[in-house]
Image (cartoon, rainbow, N blue to C red):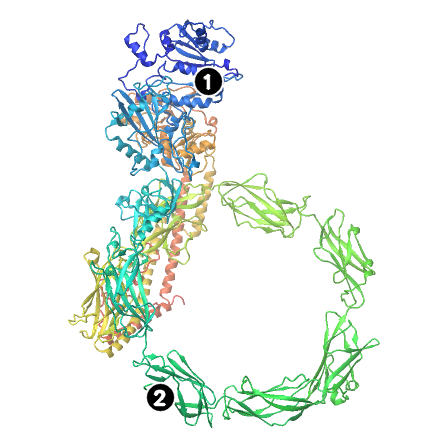
């Protein structure tokens, strides 16, 4: 390539057979095509040159019948399309000359201008490499090309020049594009008939044709190396994409006109997950019209092939790009898609290969007649399978193939919202399960969820419904892609169908709009009955809400049913459902709504006939008063069902009320007494009709009242319903006593048949009406004296009355006078009269006589008028006022009562004088009698002489202003007390001292101001604070101190007192204590301040080793102690307390204990303590961070590297059969339990003694450890998997005998404090086969008679019978039948009582194994004698389970005498209570006995196990000394120390880096095996040196991941790459044995594989080394090996031979030289198999295992003996013996009651008791503590049900010889 187009040259060079001059001449002739040339050759070929050999009769695959294609077909067109000139250079095989022809457009034009023959030229024959005929400077490329001809036997070169600029640009910059198109055109010539199939290595598949390589080189000006591309390396061409993305192929062949053969293939490109895999054609030369998505309201999804044709066409092996075949009739999409989705046709692509019988255009771009001939009716298509034609209908074969591709390859539907798995018993056995349940699918961009409305297609009929769930067959878990599945469909409308359909997923109509579905469902709903049309053909219509008089006739009714469409119907529509065939009936009911409930008084049902409608006759005589309802209800057939699914059928209701008749009489209703004189009362009158019904009173009714001795009147009369109420009747008369007087009252109403009524009433004195008070004249008293009045209470008739709570109250009032709060009270409730008096009347500040008024009235009674009386009050002459003064300097100060007196602290209050005044303000002379009544509180004794003079003692003032002194003066007189008090409060004096303190922390950072302030206060001589200071006092304040910066200090007055100093700062470099001196005038104070370091800005980790390097620990190890110190900028420790410090870590790293934020101590340190790390392997960081104020300070990053501990168990994995059903009493399936270490590999050191299986009742919790308080059974494993250390098997462990939910869990006791639990396995234990019947709820022994009352004849109120299995579990689920109940007599009585209805027996249904007996009664007056009978309950039916279950008897007593029945009932109840107690005692005794037996058996088993292990210990260790737990612990320690000592001894080790510890990585080959002998290890390691570093993986996917991670540098070997069929048999003998079995060859031959020792992964290692070593044999010396080979090759093949001296004889016989001599160990540099541990180590391991098992057995024996001893002590305790005595007493009482009842106890040894239910049965056979002891099962020899218990059935505990506890 050159920037100058004239210098650009294209050379096409091949190493084909070349062309002769004749053939070159034919190439240059225009219109001489291959077809015309063939006819010319057939007429005769005069030359000896060979023509093209076309073997038309021989079929060539894919018509690849030439190297590239025929020459001369379109060659000149292609040349002159690219350029304007071409030079053809060719040399045929065997020729010495090179033929060269130049053809150019310029030459043609020149000849045309010269009028010469245009299409004539000159073929030059020259020697190879001769370029002398070339002239010009632009022909350097041609010269180089010609010079390279030397040495070539045959070739052809096409040189094109004169290339246009556009073509040059395309060739240079579109290099990859046209190369890819070229690879697509000649794809099958390049890659063979199968195309570019993906292979593991870049190797070409075998091609029966010639090996053609097409390589392109582009030389550019200025570039030394050309751009090289081989077409075989291109993988982006369309045919490669089609081949590699296809999941399946369909090959066929078409024969056209007999000789025309077309081979074809159809490929299927599946839909995978979320996209189509059909390749996109980026270089399609055809112009395909793409539909614009904007023309639609939705986006057109990518649909695979889209608008492209199916088939690309190849002619003679090369692509004809412009011809495609759309489809054939048999592979076209049918109009009815049947069972295949439409989009499957868009996922196919195809290729057609034609032979030479089809013509193409001259430019090889288009077929001329291919599609027409293929679609001819005579064309025959046949399918090709494995190269053979299959004669069958190709249409059906193609559809079957397409369906198979869709089902197996497409992952089109995404199933999500997984809800579990189910089984479907209704399906065939192979399709019953498992079915995965999903609630959502995604299909073709749409989401269908549970509850969506959908429509089906291709179903008869079309179904509409709602999605319940989606079902997918197979064992799926979680989201999955698939194509099949089913839809569980609730068919709509459910009113008609009410059933669930299952429809295949492909029948889902995804094109159905939602409105169409809704419209179809609504159309069906409209056919339901909608309403009733009611008419009254004969009149007498009843209207809703009408009031109907009693006896009125209701006319005949005609009813019609109408649906939503307005059509009259008489039955449900539809014919596919049984419900749709039911007729519609109408039921008429008349309901009376009485007070006691609704009562149906009429009920009729009418059907619709062909000649008559729904009709009901008229009804008469409805007389019951009250509301009624006439209800017409549509129902289905005779079943009475009034709803269809959840929709109520139409109905009509008429509500009417029956009213009463006219009134004929009246009665007096209930009177509300008592009645009093003058108090109104009411009389109710009720009117009745002729039937006694209450009715309304007649109009214009006026009652008349009369009574002798009374004056009567009433206000008015009102009506309340049917009652006439005469209101406000008032009676006036004389009543002498409080007991009252009787009167006769007559009431008369004119106009009624019975018009009068007489009643007697009693009248009591009336309510208070007035008060009588005496005297009426005013009274005179002195202030402070009391007054009294005589009072009487009277009613309206002036009768003295008494009433509850009659209280007379007197209140006093006077204008202008305060203090009259005195009130007098008098209770007149019992007598009605009395004297009203009270406390003295005391008026304040009374100086002149006043007149006050007393108001006397009844308390709380405003209807009684108050009475007024006047009282004259004169002033009192007693002391009333005290005046007090004191001397303050020269001033006399008055003291105010209850006020403060302020005076200097520490002084005295002196010159106290007082005066006394009376009420009128007159001073009272002081005398000794008066002052003796005066008391002061500050002295105990006073001087009478001073008091007479009016002088009081001095008062001492407190020293502190905080203290105050309360003093009081009082005078006690009969007329009243006079009190005077005040408070003495001290105030501060003159300043006497100064005190300075620091308001906060006294620590000051060097160079920083003090955060706290200095407070200086002044105080007086008593220490009282002086708060007020003069303004000039601040100038006298002075500060001084060492290093103090005085200029920065700030001084001010304090807010409350003293001075406020701030801005204290010290300079210097020393830390420590400094004093601050504060001076005010002559007063001095000092403050000590501590100078500390600066603020913290850094973090330092103390005592942490090598902070720059990571600490390497294992998971679960402890880190060094972590301490963090705060530092300032200079690195000094900053003692800042309470600074929050957190330890930040990687989220995957877990610390124990959990790291929390801590605060620094007083030294600025945080001690995090010692952490235990837990994490997966890797390197993690710990970064301490401190939060100082609002900023965060980070410390150094501490690195921790975690390595997995391969000897630490971390997980217990369980594998078992999950789909199995478990029955009580059987055995579990096998459990395979694996113990995994931290590297997710099996723990080789896991011990079976530490593994156990726990079974316990499910407690409904998700905790992974056993819940406390729940008993569980424990089992050891049966054995360990010998091939896989760390795996244990639990086989045939017993299932508990009690049905229910259980939890199974496996626990591995790693050590004394660590237990590793597996996940909880929830299992449901089902009951076994039923064998007995039991009673769930005990009915007791009933006592019945043949009396008339049903309660006396009742045998059973409600009893449930249940089927039980042999263990007492309630069984019989899904079992149904009938239970026959009949009366039997065990004494053989002939006359048996009959059941109700005089039946001998009745049948009760049995559903799910249970039957309920309800209300079983004897017949009235039934026959039978008094005595005991039984209800015999037996199963009916022909099933085997019903005939093998014995019946059960329920006893009862029958009495002909009713009185005797009550006595029998009492005894029966008492006997039932005794039976319950005795059964509980016997159950306790039996459980105790069984537990004792179980514990003894456990002790025996533990003893036997311990003895067995002791014997094994003696054999293994060779010691006979007596062992204890302490000595065993010492032996364990010794064995562990010995093991560690042996491990530390030097031995041969492999120094290669181990492979990553992952689940699917087995390891490196050098680490998988060990070799004991050093010579063998040296030779074998050298022999396999190329494979020692290879990593073995289980899967290819893991190997590819490692390959990518190591950038291809690591050797890898996947197990699934190895062919297992060629693996050697490890048990096969040496090859010489087959031919000379008796001879022993020298050199001790042995297979090399038998010298390997595998410590783990045995099977995998055998596969790997069997493939690598094969049958390689080891011998002693080279001489032995040569002799062995000489003898062996005479008979068979000899494998590779190795010697212990290091020599090798290859399998081909070659030996000797450096390449066949093993290197010394030093030269192998650790790339050698390691040596196994010595036999002493294995012996120590066996001893340690034996000793640990012995210790576990000894511990178990000691614990079991302890449990047995505790149980025996409890069994012999006094509490247990008292229960035995109580049980015997109860049995004696029971025997006496049985004698009274006439019962005969059963004979000794018989079983006369059957448990009531399964629980009782389980109490009779309780579970043992240990699972090895099965529970005893009672042998039931009788099915007699009885509450009595046989005394000989149980054995009581023996009496103890001595009390163990005492």
Dot 2, crowdedness within 10 Å: few (<14), some or many (≥20)? Answer: some
Residue 501 versus residue 1580: which sits nearer the camera?
A: 501
Residue 117 versus residue 798: which sits nearer the camera?
A: 117
Residue 246 versus residue 1798: which sits nearer the camera?
A: 246
- Residue lying at the far left in this picture: please name it: 1390
Q: In which quarter of the image is residue 1436?
A: bottom left
Circle 2 sits in a helix, a strand or a loop, which is it? strand
Q: Is residue 794 left or right of residue 608?
A: right
Horizontal and vertical percent for residue 1709? 35, 20
Q: Is residue 1793 left or right of residue 140?
A: left
Give the position of the C terminus as an image quadrant: bottom left
Look at 42% across and 10% down and name the residue there: 88
Question: Is the residue 1241 above or below the residue 1364 in the image?
Answer: above
Horizontal and vertical percent for residue 1465? 27, 75
Question: Is the residue 1595 above or below the residue 641 in the image?
Answer: above
Image mark for residue 217: 1
Say whether residue 779 is visible.
yes
Question: Is the residue 1394 above or below the residue 348 in the image?
Answer: below
Q: Quadrant of residue 1548?
A: top left
Image mark for residue 756: 2
Horizontal and vertical percent for residue 739? 45, 92
Dot 1, crowdedness within 10 Å: few (<14), some or many (≥20)? Answer: few
Q: In which quarter of the image is residue 1062?
A: bottom right
Look at 53% across and 50% down and name the residue there: 1154
Return the disc, 2 or 1, that comes first in the chain's sequence.
1
Horizontal and vertical percent for residue 93? 36, 9
Alpha-carbon distance for marks 2 and 1? 141 Å
- Which tag is nearer the camera, tag 2 or tag 1? 2
């Amino acid at each position: 390539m050159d920037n100058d187009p004239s210098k650009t040259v294209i050379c096409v060079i091949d190493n084909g057979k070349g062309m002769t001059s004749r053939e070159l001449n034919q190439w240059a002739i225009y219109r001489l095509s291959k077809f015309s040339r063939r006819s010319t050759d057939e007429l005769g070929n005069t030359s000896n040159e060979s023509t093209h050999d076309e073997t038309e009769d021989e079929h060539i695959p894919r018509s690849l019948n030439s190297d590239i294609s025929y020459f001369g077909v379109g060659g000149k067109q292609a040349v002159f399309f690219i350029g304007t000139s071409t030079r053809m250079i060719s040399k045929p095989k065997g020729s010495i000359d090179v033929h060269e022809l130049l053809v150019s457009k310029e030459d043609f034009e020149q000849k045309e201008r010269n009028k010469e023959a245009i299409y004539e030229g000159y073929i030059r024959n020259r020697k190879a490499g001769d370029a002398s005929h070339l002239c010009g400077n632009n022909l350097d490329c041609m010269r180089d090309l010609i010079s390279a001809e030397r040495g070539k036997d045959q070739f052809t070169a096409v040189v094109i020049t004169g290339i246009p600029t556009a073509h040059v640009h395309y060739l240079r910059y579109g290099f990859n594009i046209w190369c890819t198109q070229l690879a697509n055109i000649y794809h099958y010539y390049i890659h063979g008939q199968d195309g570019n199939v993906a292979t593991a290595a870049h190797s070409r598949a075998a091609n029966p044709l010639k090996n053609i390589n097409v390589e392109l080189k582009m030389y550019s000006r200025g570039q030394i190396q050309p751009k090289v591309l081989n077409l075989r390396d291109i993988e982006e061409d369309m045919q490669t994409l089609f081949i590699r993305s296809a999941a399946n192929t369909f090959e066929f062949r078409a024969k056209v006109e007999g000789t025309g053969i077309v081979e074809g293939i159809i490929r299927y490109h599946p839909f995978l997950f979320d996209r189509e895999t059909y390749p996109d054609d980026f270089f399609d030369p055809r112009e395909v019209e793409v539909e614009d998505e904007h023309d639609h309201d939705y986006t057109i999804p990518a649909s695979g092939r889209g608008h492209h044709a199916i088939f690309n066409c190849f002619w003679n092996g090369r692509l004809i790009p412009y011809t495609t075949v759309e489809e054939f009739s048999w592979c076209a999409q049918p109009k009815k898609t049947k069972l295949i989705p439409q989009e499957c046709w868009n996922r196919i692509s195809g290729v057609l290969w034609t032979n030479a019988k089809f013509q193409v255009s001259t430019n090889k771009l288009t077929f001329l007649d291919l599609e027409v001939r293929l679609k001819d009716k005579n064309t025959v298509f046949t399918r090709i399978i494995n190269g053979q034609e299959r004669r069958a209908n190709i249409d059906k074969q193609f559809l079957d193939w397409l369906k198979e591709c869709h089902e197996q390859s497409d992952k089109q539907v995404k199933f999500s919202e997984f809800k579990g798995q189910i089984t479907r018993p209704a399906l065939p056995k192979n399709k019953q399960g498992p079915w995965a349940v999903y609630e959502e699918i995604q299909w073709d961009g749409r989401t269908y969820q549970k509850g969506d409305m959908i429509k089906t297609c291709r179903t008869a009929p079309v179904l509409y419904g709602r999605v319940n769930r989606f079902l997918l067959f197979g064992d799926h878990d979680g989201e999955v892609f698939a194509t099949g599945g089913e839809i569980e469909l609730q068919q709509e409308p459910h009113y008609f169908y009410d059933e669930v359909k299952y429809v295949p997923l492909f029948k889902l109509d995804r094109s159905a709009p939602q409105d169409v579905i809704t419209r179809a469902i609504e159309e069906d709903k409209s056919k339901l009955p909608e309403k009733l049309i009611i008419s009254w053909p004969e009149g007498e219509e009843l209207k809703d809400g009408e009031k109907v008089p009693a006896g009125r006739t209701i006319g005949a009714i005609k009813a019609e049913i109408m649906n939503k469409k307005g059509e009259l119907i008489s039955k449900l529509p539809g014919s596919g459902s049984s419900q749709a065939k039911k007729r519609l009936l109408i039921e008429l009911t008349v309901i009376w709504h009485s007070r006691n409930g609704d009562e149906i008084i009429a009920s009729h049902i009418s059907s619709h006939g062909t000649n008559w409608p729904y009709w009901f006759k008229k009804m008469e005589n409805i007389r019951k008063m009250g509301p009624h309802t006439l209800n017409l209800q549509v129902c289905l057939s005779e079943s009475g069902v009034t709803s269809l699914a959840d929709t109520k059928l139409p109905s009509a209701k008429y509500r009417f009320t029956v009213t009463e008749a006219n009134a004929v009489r009246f009665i007096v209703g209930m009177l509300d007494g008592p009645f009093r004189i003058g108090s109104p009362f009411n009389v109710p009158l009720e009117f009745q009709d002729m039937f006694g019904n209450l009715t309304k009173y007649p109009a214009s009714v006026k009652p008349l009242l009369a009574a002798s001795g009374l004056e009567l009147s009433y206000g008015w009369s009102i009506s309340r319903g049917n009652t006439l109420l005469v209101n406000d009747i008032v009676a006036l008369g004389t009543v002498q006593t409080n007991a009252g007087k009787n009167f006769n009252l007559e009431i008369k109403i004119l106009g009624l048949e019975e018009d009068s009524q007489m009643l007697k009433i009693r009248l009591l004195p009336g309510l208070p009406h007035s008060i009588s008070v005496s005297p009426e004249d005013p009274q005179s008293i002195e202030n402070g004296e009391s007054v009294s009045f005589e009072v009487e209470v009277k009613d309206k008739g002036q009768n003295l009355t008494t009433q509850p709570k009659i209280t007379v109250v007197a209140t006093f009032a006077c204008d202008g006078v305060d203090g009259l709060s005195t009130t007098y009270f008098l209770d007149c409730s019992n007598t009605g009269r009395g004297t009203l008096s009270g406390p003295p009347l005391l008026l304040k500040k009374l100086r002149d006589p006043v007149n006050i008024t007393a108001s006397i009235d009844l308390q709380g009674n405003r209807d009684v008028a108050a009475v007024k009386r006047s009282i004259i009050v004169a002033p009192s002459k007693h002391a009333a006022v005290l005046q007090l003064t004191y001397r303050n300097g020269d001033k006399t100060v008055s003291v105010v009562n209850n006020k403060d007196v302020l005076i200097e602290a520490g002084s005295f209050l002196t010159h106290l004088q007082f005066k006394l005044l009376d009420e009128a303000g007159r001073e009272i002379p002081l005398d000794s009698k008066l002052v003796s009544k005066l008391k002061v509180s500050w002295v105990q004794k006073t001087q009478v002489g001073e008091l007479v003079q009016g002088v009081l003692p001095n008062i001492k003032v407190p020293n502190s202003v905080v203290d105050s002194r309360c003093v009081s003066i009082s005078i006690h007189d009969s007329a009243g007390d006079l009190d005077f008090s005040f408070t003495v409060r001290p105030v501060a004096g003159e300043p006497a001292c100064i005190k300075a303190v620091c308001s906060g922390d006294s620590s000051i950072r060097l160079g920083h101001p003090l955060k706290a302030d200095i407070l200086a206060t002044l105080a007086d001589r008593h220490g009282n604070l002086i708060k007020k200071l003069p303004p000039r006092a601040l100038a006298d304040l002075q500060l001084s101190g060492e290093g103090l910066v005085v200029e920065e200090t700030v001084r001010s007055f304090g807010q409350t007192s003293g001075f406020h100093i701030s801005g204290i700062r010290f300079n210097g470099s020393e830390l420590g204590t400094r004093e601050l001196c504060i001076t005010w005038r002559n007063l001095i104070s000092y403050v000590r301040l501590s100078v500390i370091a600066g603020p913290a800005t850094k973090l330092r980790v103390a005592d942490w080793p090598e902070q720059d390097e990571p600490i390497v620990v294992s998971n679960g190890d402890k880190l060094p102690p972590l301490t963090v110190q705060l530092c300032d900028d200079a690195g000094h420790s900053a003692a800042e307390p309470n600074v929050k410090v957190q330890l930040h870590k990687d989220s995957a790293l877990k610390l124990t204990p959990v790291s929390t934020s801590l605060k620094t101590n007083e030294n600025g340190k945080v001690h995090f303590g010692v952490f235990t790390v837990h994490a997966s392997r890797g390197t993690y960081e710990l970064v301490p961070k401190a939060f100082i104020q609002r900023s965060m300070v980070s410390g150094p990053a501490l690195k921790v590297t975690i390595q997995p501990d391969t000897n630490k168990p971390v997980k217990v994995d369980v594998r078992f059969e999950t789909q199995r059903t478990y029955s009580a009493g059987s055995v579990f399936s096998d459990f395979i339990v694996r113990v995994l270490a931290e590297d997710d590999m099996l723990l080789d050191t896991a011990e079976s003694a530490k593994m156990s299986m726990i079974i316990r009742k499910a407690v409904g919790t998700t905790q992974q450890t056993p819940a406390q308080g729940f008993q569980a059974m424990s089992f050891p494993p049966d054995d360990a998997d010998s091939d896989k250390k760390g795996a244990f098997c639990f086989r045939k462990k017993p299932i508990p005998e009690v049905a229910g939910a259980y939890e199974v869990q496996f626990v591995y006791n790693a050590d004394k404090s660590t237990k590793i639990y597996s996940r909880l396995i929830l299992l449901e234990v089902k009951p076994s086969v039923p064998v007995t019947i039991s009673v769930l709820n005990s009915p007791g022994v009933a006592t019945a008679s043949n009396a008339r009352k049903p309660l006396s004849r009742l045998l059973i109120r409600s009893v449930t019978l249940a089927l039980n299995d042999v263990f007492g579990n309630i069984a019989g689920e899904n079992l149904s039948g009938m239970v026959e109940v009949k009366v039997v007599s065990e004494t053989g009585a002939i006359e048996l009582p009959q059941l109700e209805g005089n039946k001998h027996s009745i049948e009760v249904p049995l559903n799910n194994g249970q039957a309920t007996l309800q209300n079983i009664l004897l017949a009235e007056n039934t026959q039978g004698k008094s005595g005991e009978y039984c209800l015999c309950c037996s199963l009916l039916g022909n099933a085997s389970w019903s005939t093998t279950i014995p019946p059960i008897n329920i006893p009862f007593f029958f009495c002909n005498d009713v009185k005797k029945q009550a006595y029998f009932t009492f005894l029966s109840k008492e006997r039932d209570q005794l039976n319950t107690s005795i059964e509980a005692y016997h159950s306790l005794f039996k459980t105790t006995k069984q537990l004792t037996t179980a514990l003894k058996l456990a002790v025996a088993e533990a003893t036997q196990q311990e003895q067995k292990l002791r014997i094994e210990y003696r054999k293994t260790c060779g010691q006979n000394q007596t062992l204890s737990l302490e000595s065993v612990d010492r032996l364990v320690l010794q064995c562990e120390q010995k093991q560690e000592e042996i491990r530390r001894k030097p031995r041969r080790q492999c120094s290669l880096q181990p492979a990553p510890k992952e689940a699917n990585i087995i390891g490196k080959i050098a680490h998988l095996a060990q070799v004991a002998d050093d010579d063998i290890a040296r030779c074998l390691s050298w022999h396999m040196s190329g494979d020692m570093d290879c990593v073995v993986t289980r899967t290819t996917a893991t190997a590819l991941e490692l390959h990518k991670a190591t950038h291809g540098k690591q050797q890898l070997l996947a197990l699934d790459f190895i062919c297992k069929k060629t693996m050697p048999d490890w048990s096969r003998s040496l090859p010489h044995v087959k031919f000379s079995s008796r001879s022993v060859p020298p050199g001790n031959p042995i297979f090399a594989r038998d010298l390997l020792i595998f410590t783990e992964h045995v099977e995998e290692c055998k596969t790997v080394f069997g493939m690598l070593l094969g049958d390689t044999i080891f011998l002693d010396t080279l001489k032995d090996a040569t002799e062995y080979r000489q003898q062996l090759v005479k008979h068979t093949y000899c494998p590779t031979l190795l010697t212990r001296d290091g020599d090798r004889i290859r399998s081909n016989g070659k030996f000797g030289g450096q390449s066949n001599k093993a290197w010394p160990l030093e030269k192998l540099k650790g790339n050698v198999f390691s040596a196994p541990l010595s036999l002493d180590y294995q012996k120590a391991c066996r001893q340690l295992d034996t000793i640990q098992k012995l210790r576990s057995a000894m511990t178990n024996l000691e614990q079991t003996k302890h449990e047995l001893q505790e149980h025996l002590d409890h069994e012999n305790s006094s509490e247990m013996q008292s229960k035995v005595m109580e049980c015997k007493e109860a049995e004696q009482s029971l025997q006496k009651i049985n004698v009274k009842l006439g019962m005969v106890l059963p004979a000794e040894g018989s079983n006369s008791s059957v448990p009531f239910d399964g629980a009782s049965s389980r109490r009779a056979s309780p579970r043992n503590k240990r699972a090895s002891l099965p529970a005893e099962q009672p042998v039931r020899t009788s099915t007699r049900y009885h509450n009595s218990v046989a005394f000989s059935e149980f054995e009581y505990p023996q009496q103890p010889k001595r009390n163990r506890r005492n």
